Amino acid sequence: MAEAVKKPRPEFRNIGLGQILFAYRLPLAGRVSILHRVSGALLFIFLPFLLYLFDQSLTSELSFEVFKGFLSNVIVKLIVLVLSWAFLFHFCAGVRHLVMDTNHGAVSKEKGKQTSIVVLIVSSLLTLAVAAKLFGVF
């Protein structure tokens, strides 16, 4: 008998971060989902820093003045601004997920895109308000 022609078996590999970010065109809802995870990871990693800032602001009047001096540094303000974005974005995206869990009419491509746009706009506006307050605009 003739030998069977062997077909090459398909290879399935895990995709890398570069492929996710640049090769695939994710829908807006997918990008918001990834940003939701990134913001949650940032909040978890910087939790000791946030607790330290909270502790320093509440210990005494003198420690509060030291805290205000510490927060006057531009680099610290930028770190606080990034953490504020992470909190606000994570909160807005979490509300979006709760709405999708309780209202099955909100689970469609169109509604997913609409709610993703709302999350991006609301969290951006809130972050701009925090930045304005943090950098002394008002």
Image (tube, rainbow, N blue to C red):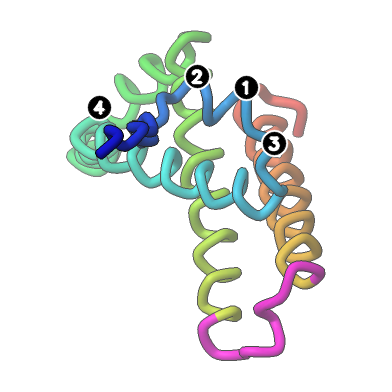
State yes or no: residue 109 in magenta.
yes
Viewer-side residue, 42 vs 65: 42
Q: Amino acid at mark 4?
A: Leu
Structural distance between the alpha carbons of marks 3 and 2: 12 Å
Residue named by callout 4: 62
Q: Amino acid at mark 2?
A: Gly
Give me the residue at 66% from left, 31% from top. Answer: 131
Residue that numbered label 3 is attached to:
25
Which class describes the residues within 10 Å of circle 2: few (<14), some (14-19), or many (20+)? few
Please say whether residue 11 is visible from this viewpoint: no
Residue 31 position, x and y percent, is 61, 44
Q: Position of residue 53 (x, y in %)?
A: 28, 33
Write the residue at 62% across / 24% down: 23
In this picture, which residue range is highlighted in magenta? 101-110
User: Of label 4 and label 2, which has the lower sequence position?
Assistant: 2
Q: Which residue is mark 1?
A: 22
Image coordinates for residue 86, horizontal then vertical, percent: 49, 41
